[in-house]
Image: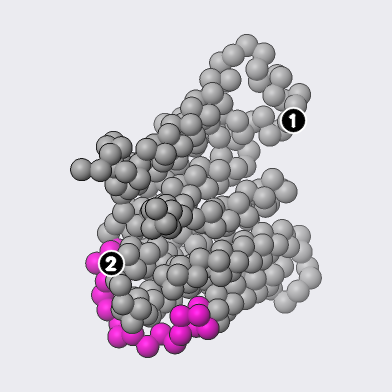
Amino acid sequence: MKKRAIRKNRLLRPADAFLPLAFIIATLLGKSAVAERVYLNMLFPALFALSSARGVRIAFSEQPSMRRVAGSVRLALALQFIGALAFLVVDLIRNHGQFVSTNIIYIAAGMMLNVEHVFYEYLFATGDGASATRVRAITAALTAAGIMMTSEASTLGSMPHGLEWLLGGATLSAALSAFIGGAIGGKLRGKVNDRVLRCAPLAMVQSAVYPLAWLLALMLLKPIMFESLTALPFFAGLAVCELARTPFRRTGGESKGFNIAMLVVALVGAVLIGMRYVPGAQAFTASLIGKWSHELTALGVMLVLSAVCSFALYGNVKVREG
């Protein structure tokens, strides 16, 4: 019974939603564009790094030896720097050979957050989920604060737009996670192994499916999606996807509760979409929540898409073992 409880706890990690929650809070406080930019400068370098920050979780699930886990971490850390450099080259080409200082800072901050992600997964691999949760809570708080301190009108500080707060917070998060990971898991002495590379295709699919669904919604549902004034719908769906994340698809025995949860999320999304077509509903919600009523339909779409993506990646039609 105890083993079953531990297994279920590992499948659901509330800390996985902390960073999307930080983006949601920053968006609600008026920093949607900055939050979106931070996220994208995490996502694209991560994809160039073969989604190895996420891939280590898959690799860890197949590696009972901590020395092999350490070897996977070493390779994943190297890939974060390579991925950031590759994205910087792409940005340089996109800007016709001109370095844009703000872009460099955002890419550096995104890289540091991806480095923190590697150590966050490493802490879970050591069995110390409590420390991993605390580290991610600190990271989320520092990231939200850094986003809030960023402003195009800012003339304070040594970096454009006050970006030293964002970069400093991301760097501190990476350093803290590395320090705690080293203190708990020991030095990364394991021989570098290629397990992360073998897990890269699945990790990249897991990383890209929801953002691609968002892009598809923007193209096919323009009248609905462009009513939204912020990235709130996207980040809300992202939080669902992060909470649903597991290294592999759930087994039949693990899927019943998960399937019900995704069905509830999809139904909530469908209700929000349906309100668009109920006479007087939009006026009523506008009187209650003001400008945020513009987000509701797009929020509904993204909740439905997040539930569909999560079920496709991590769910199982079977709800029994065997």
Q: Residue furthest right?
A: 156
Q: Is 183 on the left or on the right of 187, as rendered?
A: right
Relative image position of residue 172 (x, y in whole percent): 62, 76
Residue drawn at x 79%, y 70% is 156
Magenta highlight range: 181-200
Query: Label 1 belongs to which residue?
Result: 290
Query: Label 2 belongs to which residue?
Result: 62
Q: CA distance from mark 2 to mark 1?
A: 49 Å
Mark 2 Cα-neighbour bin, 10 Å: few <14, some 14–19, many ≥20:
few
Q: Is residue 183 magenta?
A: yes
Residue drawn at x 41%, y 41% is 258
What's under tag 2, amino acid-wise? Glu
Q: Nearer the viewer, residue 296 or 311?
A: 311
Mark 1 Cα-neighbour bin, 10 Å: few <14, some 14–19, many ≥20:
few
What's under tag 1, amino acid-wise? Gly
Q: Residue furthest front?
A: 1
Q: Nearer the viewer, residue 263 or 211?
A: 263
Tell me the mark number nearer the camera, choosing from 2 and 1: 2
Residue drawn at x 76%, y 60% is 153
- Which secondary structure, mark 2? loop
